Amino acid sequence: MIITKLTKLTKLTNREYEILAYIAVGMSVKEIADYTCRSIFTIRKTLENVKLKLGFQKATELTAYFLCQHFRNEFLSAELVMINI
């Protein structure tokens, strides 16, 4: 299941990934809409598309997944740097 979601994460568009990142840092749909100069409806539709692609139902699940992936990638990058020393 996790492997499937990892490969699906790479299939997100740049805009979908950006919206997911804003959600993960705690921005509301309205804040994202204002910040990106898009409508609230566009942001909501983008989030629905992300949830469908990744197989989640709630924004909290998206946030948890995104943050876990981010910290996992940071950890792996740090390990690679330490191995090269």
Image (spheres, rainbow, N blue to C red):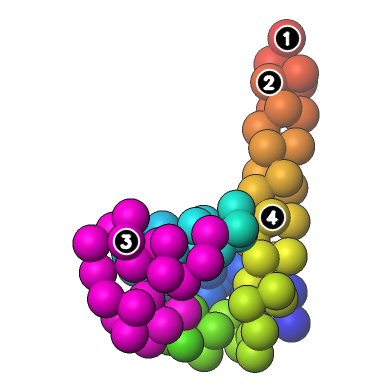
Of marks 3 and 2, the one in the foreground: 3
Let me know if residue 38 is in the magenta part: yes
Q: Is residue 43 visible?
A: yes
Q: Which residue is mark 3?
A: 34
Of marks 1 and 4, the one in the foreground: 4
Is there a contact, CB below 8 Å, between mark 3 and mark 4? no
Disc 1 on helix, strand or loop? Answer: loop
Q: Residue at x 33, y 85 (%)?
A: 41
Q: Mark 1 belongs to which amino acid? A: Ile
Q: Which residue is mark 1?
A: 85
Q: Is residue 53 visible?
A: no
State the separation of the CA atoms marked 3 and 4: 23 Å
State the separation of the CA atoms marked 3 and 2: 38 Å
| Magenta residues (range) | 27-47
| Rendered location of residue 85, percent (x, y) | 73, 9
Q: Mark 3 belongs to which amino acid? A: Asp
Q: Mark 4 belongs to which amino acid? A: Leu
Main SS of the magenta segment? helix
